[in-house]
Each structure stands twice: as structure tokens, then as C-alpha cells.
Amino acid sequence: MNPIPWTYVRAELGREPLAAMGLGAGLFGAISILGTCWAVPRLPEGVLTVLSLSLAVEGLPALVLVNTLLAVWFVAYFVGAVVVLRAIPAPRAEGGLDILLVKPVPPAVFVWSRILPALGLSAAVGLALSVTQVIGLWGLLGADLSAATVLGIGLTTVAIAIAQLGALTALTARTTELAGALGVAIAVFMAPMTPTSVFIYRPDLFPAEGVGRTLFVAPTNLIVHSGVITWAWPVVMIVGVGLAALGLAWAARRVVVG
């Protein structure tokens, strides 16, 4: 077994301007979250009622949280997706990936070295935004919605984003067009949201009551089951990282064409 070329690994890990990307994404996400926490409580009562019914949540704190969760999820996923798309699909589309793969580096090392920064960036930005979410919701927290619950739900969405980045890596390992890879990135993000879109327009297609009504309605389902998420989010994070690792392993087997 050949030793891991650590010099190459360190060079790849430092290839992207992660600090600048993380700062920009973090600022965008923080402004979105704090703006939502300020704006939603000031909406007319009728609008709040419609939103609550559409998203199947009860109470103003839960309604604000479901909206801020979308910001955490969106930013944590897409800041990592940019790195993923620049790592493999972009050089393949430009015709330079074959040259990179000529290096005496195993495909697995190549893939992991290029994608780990995306996962780390997503986790760091997601953690920062989850904390920002707690700060923004501080005035609305109470017995039904604690700081630990908000933080746990936020980190659960980060775990889902990390798993999605692993899937994106696997699905775009052989993509030859950058536009196609971008379409895949959007589809991967939207896939868990599809039941939510259906629920908003056709709630009659879902069970009238019980767990099944919101089981697949993300991210409402995280709030409905917040009692479990509060203590189970570390398990979800481990599962998310594990699924991402499977995606990277599959991508490593597919990245070399021929």
C-alpha cells in the first residue's frame, strides 16, 4: 500500500480561499436569519395564520424558526456545493481533470483532498449560523422552544447538508458540463423540499393528523419532533458524515473514466 502523499494533500486543502468564502456566506446567512427574526413577528396576523397553516407549525417561535432553518440549510449547503463544483466538475468541463489525475496520487486521495474542504466549510458556516439563529430567536425562546432545541435543530440541518454534499460529489463525479453539475446541485438541495412544496398546495394528500402528516415536510418535521432532535442531533451528525463519506468513496471509484 502506497503512503499517503501528505504534501499533495496539504496543497489541495489550501487550494480554495475558504476563509473568504466562509466569511461571505456567514455574513449573508446571518443577515438573512436576523432579518427574518425581525420581520416575521411584524407581519399582519392574517399573514402569520396563513404561513402557520401552510407550514404546519403552531406559534410564532416555531414559525420564525422554520424560516430561519431554511437560511441555515441553504447557506450551509451551497457554500460547500461551490467548492464541490470547483473541485471535480469544473476542471473536467475545462478538459483539465485528466491532467490532474495523471499525478501519482490515488483517486481516493484526490477526491477526499478536494472535497473535505467543502464539508469542513459547510460545517463551520452551519455551526456559526445555528448559533446566530439562537441569538436571533432569544426573545421568543421559552418552555416549548429552548436554546438547546434551536441549536440542535440547526445542527441537524447542517448534518443533512453535509450528507447532500456527499451525494452531490458522487452524482457529479463524471459530469462533463458545468451547467449540468449546477443543475444536479440544485436538484439535490430541492429533493427533500419536494414534499413540502406538495404539502403547501395540497395538504389534503397527507394524513389529517398524527406523525405521518409532517414526517416528510422539511424542515417542519424537525420542529415537530424537536423533543427527539434536542438530544439526538449528534447521532444525526454522525449519520450525515457517514453518508457523505460513502458518497466520496463512490465518487473516488467513478472519477477516473475508462
Image (cartoon, helix red, strand yellow):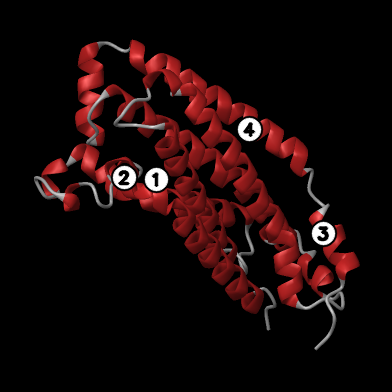
Q: Label 4 neighbourhood size at 10 Å, few (<14), some (14-19), many (20+)?
A: many
- Location of residue 210 in the rendering, given as x and y in whole percent from the top left corner: 13, 49
The earlier-in-sequence mark between 1 and 3 is: 3
Question: Which is more toward the observer, 185 or 19?
Answer: 19
Q: Residue 12's mark? A: 3
User: Rounded to the nearest whole Å, what is the CA distance between mark 3 and mark 2?
Assistant: 41 Å
Task: Please name the amino acid that badge 3 sits on.
Answer: Glu
The earlier-in-sequence mark between 2 and 4 is: 4
Task: Please name the amino acid that badge 2 sits on.
Answer: Gly
User: Rounded to the nearest whole Å, what is the CA distance between mark 1 and mark 3?
Assistant: 36 Å
Task: Please name the amino acid that badge 4 sits on.
Answer: Gly
Q: Label 2 neighbourhood size at 10 Å, few (<14), some (14-19), many (20+)?
A: some
Residue 48 in which image quadrant: top left
Which residue matches tag 4?
Answer: 26
Point out the frontmost of discs 4 and 1. 1
User: Rounded to the nearest whole Å, what is the CA distance between mark 4 and mark 3?
Assistant: 23 Å
- Location of residue 9 in the rendering, given as x and y in whole percent from the top left corner: 83, 65
Which residue matches tag 2?
Answer: 227
Q: Label 1 neighbourhood size at 10 Å, few (<14), some (14-19), many (20+)?
A: many
How many numbered marks, from 0 up? 4
Q: Residue 230's mark? A: 1
Secondary structure under the numbered disc 1 in the rendered image: helix
Secondary structure under the numbered disc 4 in the rendered image: helix
The earlier-in-sequence mark between 3 and 2 is: 3
Horizontally, is 129 left or right of 228 in the view? right
Cβ–Cβ under 8 Å for marks 2 and 1: yes
Q: Residue 129's mark? A: none
